[in-house]
Amino acid sequence: MEANPVSVPAPPPWVDDRGAALFTDLYELSMLQAYRREGMDEVPATFSLFVRDLPPGRGYLLACGLDDALRFLERVRFGPEALEHLRATGRFDEEFLAWLRGFRFTGEVRAVPEGTPVFPGEPILEVTAPIAQGQLAETYVMNQVHLQTLLASKAARVVRAAAGRAVVDYGARRIHGTDAALKAARAFHVAGVSATSDVLAGWIYGVPVAGTMAHSFVQAFRSEKEAFRAFVRSFPDTVLLVDTYDTLEGVRRVVELARELGDDFRVRGVRLDSGDLAELAVGARGILDAAGLGRVEIVASGGLDEFGIAELLSRGAPIDGFGVGTRMGVSADAPALDMAYKLTEYAGEGRVKLSTGKRLLPGRKQVFRVEEGGRAVRDVLAREGEAVDGRPLLRPVMSGGERLPEGVADLDAARERTRRELEVLPERVLALRPEGPPYPVEVSPGLRAYDREVSGRAGR
């Protein structure tokens, strides 16, 4: 007679608090069990999260994603369903699973505030905790900070190219998954994007939402003018999409609608979504102005990124705002960062990595930003506690597994920090195509000496 099969609960369909602890690479859990067997799991360690190199064409990165990293550390738990799944793999022993049942993060985190520009080799955050706790944090923390830093950095470039004009995020439908789309809207807000089309992101994060209409609405009516008339009845202050059939004819139909409605005409703008946007914007502006509709704005969308926006404005296109989707939403020209999460200290002693091309400096660190005449001129990477001139960037955000005031998310404050911090960077660093020497990051004398000391005994 066959034994009854073990019943394993169905997994959650979403990465939520029930399953977040299992959003980890298998080797993390394998290392945890090995640490546990060797009696090492409670030994304090420091892990550093940083980017080794900038992607081509980037002069800086914009730190983002800290709030989600801290939320994970606050809430990570191995519930009954997660433990049963691990048991069913046959890979982990019962003593280890019993230990996981009481797993909590009790360590500390130091991080640069969201919206801070960062450069290669500089810690975006450092986790100091019993080594098993710090190890488990790697996959989830890196996932969230990588995505949001990547996208905030891209969006900041788009916002700069728009030169004060509104930028709206239209990217949700093509971003790589729902969680990524939500976190993208958050990162875009930090970077200075005006609004998102994603209604759920507006609810969760309190960011502005915006949108116009789709071509399908126009196609569903017998005529373009009839479609415009119908949409305006429901949304008088809307922006009308005018390129379904013939863009400039669409603008003329907006003028006809304005004459028809008279003082009741409140349409805010027209949107161009295809063709030569610069040429069409000039034509649309001429038609609108000739009809006395100078207040009606022109919004452009359709495959735009910072380079497309910069080209349109260099051609004198009279465009008042931009809808930007896929290329910003997936950071199309630089879709990944060389980000790493590495052990730099164990049991109070610095640890290094001497691998070719992946050199790692030891110990806990601090980053100092040196400014002269209101401009950032260099950063200094130093040992924690080392006396160095400049403004320290890493701040305590979590202690004993609980957030400190500096770790409480404020998206509007992060957005303002982005604006303020980017203003002090050199123009060559901010350029869409950076020229000249990269922004300098120096290693302090104290850290150099410590590196020589630790490297001299590494692996012995």
Image (cartoon, rainbow, N blue to C red):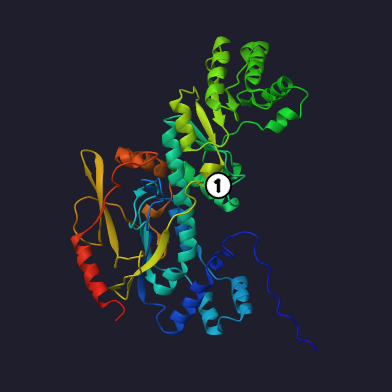
* Left or right side of 250 for 163: left
Look at 59% across and 27% down and name the residue there.
272
Residue 213's image quarter?
top right
Tell me if residue 343 comes above or below residue 166 in the rendering.
below
Look at 21% across and 61% down and name the residue there.
386
Please tell me how crowded label 1 is: few (under 14), some (14-19), or many (20+) other residues with Cα within 10 Å: few
Where does residue 262 sit, x and y in percent of width and height? Answer: 64, 11
Where does residue 120 sit, x and y in percent of width and height? Answer: 34, 55
**Amino acid marked by disc 1:** Ile
Query: Where is mark 1, residue-wise?
Result: 204
* Foreground of the two, 441 or 82: 441
Tell me if residue 349 comes above or below residue 360 in the rendering.
below
Which element is circle 1 on? helix
Where does residue 20 sit, x and y in percent of width and height? Answer: 55, 64
Where does residue 253 sit, x and y in percent of width and height? Answer: 67, 17
Tell me if residue 133 comes above or below residue 247 in the rendering.
below
Residue 74 visible, this orientation: no
Number of dots carrying numbers: 1
Tell me if residue 26 comes above or below residue 448 in the rendering.
below
Residue 353's image quarter?
bottom left
Residue 110's image quarter?
bottom left
* Foreground of the two, 18 or 302: 302
